[in-house]
Image (spheres, helix red, strand yellow):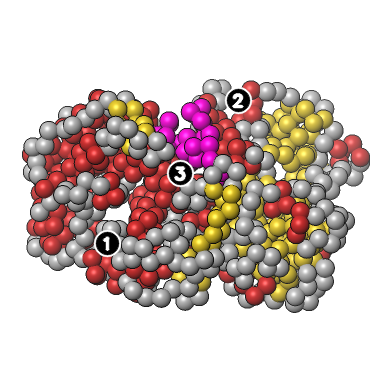
Amino acid sequence: MMKKILAFSMILCFLASMIGNVREGQAATTGPFVHPGILHTQADFDRMKQMVEAGTEPYWSGFEKLKSSPLSASGWTPRATETIIRGGDGDNVALLYIDVARAFQNAIRWKVTGDTAHGDTAVNILNAWSSTLKEVTGNADRYLAAGLYGYQLANVSEIMRDYPGFNVAQMQDMLLNVFYKPLNERFLIGNEFGDDHNGAYIQNYWANWDLCNMAATVAIGIFTDRRDIYNIGIEYFKHGAGNGSIYNAIPFLHPDGLAQWQESGRDQPHSVLGIGLMAATAEMAWNQGDDLYGWANNRFLRAAEYVAKYNNGGDVPFSTYEWGTGVNGDVRWHTEISSSGRGDARPVWEMIYNHYANRKGLSVPNIAARAQMLRPEGGPNAHNNHPSTFDQPGYGTLLYTRPAGSGGTATLHDGNIPDGTYRFIVRHSGKAMDAAGTTNGAAVHQWSYHGGSNQHWTVTHLGGGQYSVRNVQSGRSLDVAQASHDHRAKFQLWSYHGGDNQRFAFIPVGEGYHRITPVHSNKPADVDGVSTADGALIQQWRYVLGGNQQWKLEPVSVNVRLQSHNFPDRYVRHFDFRARIDANVSPVQDSQFKMVAGLADTRSVSFESVNFPGRYLRVRTNGEVWLDSNDSTTAFANDATFRRVAGLADPQKSSYQMWTDSTRYLRHFNNLLYAQSGSGSTFNADATFTEVAP
């Protein structure tokens, strides 16, 4: 059920962003995309061209490797067809993936040498497929085809987007309507084409299924200039429900800078495939100014080191991995790492090595050794038409080698929860997370909320979407005992030391609830035995969609800005004490509020001005919202108190009902703030806000 709630919430978010608000113009984005900017930028191509012309190694050897591929020869006649089938009767997917590889390799040869014979060949292939292909189908493997070849098609199309004769609009239409909508989006979050993950239990599909569809989503978003699509892929990378999102794909952190990969107990070729796909998505985001490589405290680096070390012949630790399969979540286990396919030579390591070692200057000994073993990287095997050799474009030595200290910048964005003091209310019982004492080792359990400081928790962003959580009464940190990976390891209080068992992510699960997830184990806070009794202990347990694992973060004292859902460049602010939404608020303090326990009821919220303490957002009798001084009357308290509920347009955001009239919500209309009743997509979008850190 929760899986469907999450999927539905994401669809609502997508639809609302498309509908917009006709009264106030189009919603702003974070700016135009960089083109070319999927796996390669113009600066990358300039570097390759310069180095190849100068005969500089290892670029020269990488280019020679490309030239030796028969797939890079010019003059190929495309084999486009209306229907591509992967899996089941009539499988003909080789027609697509061989042509995509030929288009890519010819595109790179054109960019490096300027030879238009290669450019013409690449464009002829792309135009043939975009004018012919109507459907990608087959058994469940059709989603793999849509992901793997969708992101590669978008990438080569991005390289050729300005080439004379390339029909960009036709390719954009084909990628959106043949790949993205019916397959990539449907698989990740569900839509009108069907439930997410092909209707299976959320943990059924291996990480690489999510990862290839995430890569296609981000790539297609960039190529089609669709920020809404791109954002779906980026958000899924951080917080998605399936096994490809970063915490699910990398469930356990181990000592010595290693982190276990989700498919490590399955085999090594699929593990390396997943590593390559996560890197591809991170590289695309980096080229657009978003740092996913560094998200979650460089979690991906630790996983890549783990997979590289094992495939180099080294020993790595392994914790028992458990997941749910099929439709109902039947449980399966891996108890040891798999040696099947150990040493897999997929060409994915140069991209990862050059980012962490040469862009960022970080030590990656196992990745460095793996890249050195395979240098110069090749590409798909023209003599072996098995799909796995075409899972990645290859030729990373040519494409991604960069000088040490080459740097580059991308933003490591803020987390999804503003800093402040909260109470944590568990869904199944409505009780609060409560500290049973103040000393190291004190138990953490659920208890009926009474407002004591032992039930209040200070949340502080540590960077990359990870947080410390400290008990207000004791000042001690929320901690998983002994940094255990095991089920039933207890949540407790302990002096703060900054270890991974004291760092948490808040993973949205829909309707305003979150998993409170210790980053070392990816096993969220869970009320033992699904008990509803006061004193039931809180432990970690694999996420099984249970209400005893879902927590609402209710503000006690949190400084926020309220960002408009449908106009994300605008924030709620006061101007001459009238509440409105504006962009570029100056002074910025006019858009900062302390979200506190409601004046009329502590289960709700009130918004106190940061720069005019004692003044609160308050609904006047005519429905207008003003910043008024608290006169301490019951009437004022009622008018300045709001129920904080799941966002009407996106359940992972917030809407605010009047305390005295649950049919009326805070909403903007012609930029001014009101409390009104209404319905429909425009009203819902106007009444939905994101709480962001100041």
Question: If you read the primary sequence from the N terminus, does the residue marked by circle 1 or circle 2 appear first?
Answer: 1
Q: Main secondary structure of the magenta part?
A: helix
Q: Which residues are magenta?
A: 180-202
**In the image, is residue 621 above or below residue 314?**
above
**In the image, is residue 30 above or below residue 500?**
above
Specify the quadrant that holds the N terminus.
top right
Image quarter for residue 500? bottom right
Q: Which residue is pictured at 64% across the width and 29% down the height?
A: 684
Residue tagged 2: 681
For badge 2, the amino acid type reads Ser
Would residue 29 appear left or right of 451 to someone viewing this image?
Answer: left
Q: Position of residue 315 (x, y in %)?
A: 41, 76
Q: Which residue is pictured at 34% across the width and 27% down the height?
A: 135
Query: In terms of depth relative to the viewer, which is nearer, 242 or 111?
Result: 242
For badge 3, the amino acid type reads Gly
Disc 1: CA contacts within 10 A as few (<14), some (14-19) or many (>=20): some
Disc 3: CA contacts within 10 A as few (<14), some (14-19) or many (>=20): many
Q: Is residue 159 visible?
A: yes
In 3D space, how far apart are the residues under numbered discs 1 and 2 (Cα atoms)?
Answer: 50 Å
Q: Position of residue 246 (x, y in %)?
A: 49, 55
Residue tagged 3: 233
Residue 345 is tagged as 1
Question: If you read the primary sequence from the N terminus, does the residue marked by circle 3 or circle 2 appear first?
Answer: 3
Q: Which residue is pictured at 65% across the width and 60% down the height?
A: 541
Q: Is residue 461 visible?
A: no
Mark 3, secondary structure of its residue: helix
Residue at the farthest front position: 89
For badge 1, the amino acid type reads Ala
Instruction: Answer whether residue 114 is magenta in the image.
Output: no
In 3D space, how far apart are the residues under numbered discs 3 and 1 (Cα atoms)?
Answer: 27 Å
